[in-house]
Amino acid sequence: MALEADASRILNYFPSAFPGLLQTEGYAREMIAAGVDAPNDELVEAGAEVRILRQRRLTEDPRLEFKAYFGEVALLVAGDQRVLAEQIRHAIKVANYPNVTLHMVPLSAGRPGILASGITLMHFPDDQSDGFVFVEAIGGMLPRRTGRDVKRAERTFVRVEQFALSPEDTIAALERKLEELT
């Protein structure tokens, strides 16, 4: 969280869920409860609250530049349909913030566009040439700090963007799913 608080720009991709900085409290609770560690109710609530607090970076100065990608499978995973509808409404709202760009990676992207794990790339205001990478793994996120890891992550995001829907098409897809749910 300290790194995220210092970052000026974050690129984030989650293949099977909405990224944490876009999650509603209900969706965050579902995602945390489904985790490998299966935390108790108190830890689920605390984790969801932290995710909501982290979102202040999107609306308070200095505003974080956030480019988020999520896999279409996030719209297909069974769960509480009301929670998913609320999550989609929230994602559409946040996607309209001037500092947020949201892309969905459709299933039709196939293997080249759909990564096996999530990835987060952070850049910092005093060091735009470097960054910090986290790769999603069972039980948490693995940090990577070398220049080689950062360059590899940047290439990964270029590839994912080639297969992702435009922000406008992403919002249209979210609206269609929301209509289907409600």
Image: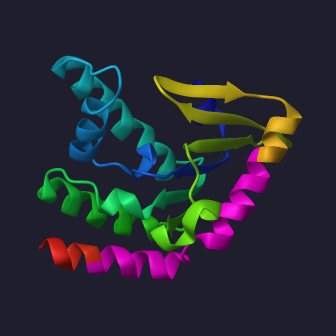
Which quarter of the figure has residue 159? bottom right
Query: Measured from the top left, where is residue 97 in percent x and y?
Result: 47, 66
Q: Is residue 34 left or right of residue 109?
A: left
Relative to 118, residue 90 above or below = below
Q: Is residue 181 left or right of residue 163?
A: left
Magenta-colored segment: predominant secondary structure: helix
| Image quarter (top left, top right, bottom left or bottom right) of the C terminus | bottom left
Question: Who is closer to the viewer here, 36 or 6?
Answer: 36
Q: Is residue 144 left or right of residue 69?
A: right
Question: Who is closer to the viewer here, 8 or 60?
Answer: 8
Relative to 52, residue 171 above or below = below
Colour mapping: rainbow
Q: Residue at x 80, y 45 (%)?
A: 152
Q: How many marks?
A: 0
Question: Who is closer to the viewer here, 78 or 126?
Answer: 78
Query: Measured from the top left, where is residue 77 in percent x and y?
Result: 27, 54
Q: Is residue 126 visible?
A: no
| 172 is within the stretch colored magenta | yes
Q: Residue at x 79, y 55 (%)?
A: 155
Relative to 132, residue 26 above or below = below
Query: Measured from the top left, where is residue 138 in percent x and y?
Result: 48, 27
Query: Measured from the top left, where is residue 81 in percent x and y?
Result: 14, 58
Q: Residue at x 21, y 53 (%)?
A: 78
| 181 is within the stretch colored magenta | no
Can you name the residue that lies furthest to the front here?
A: 111
Q: Is residue 110 visible?
A: yes
Residues in magenta, as a range: 153-176
Q: Is residue 61 left or right of residue 16?
A: right
Which quarter of the figure has residue 66? bottom right
Relative to 171, residue 38 above or below = above
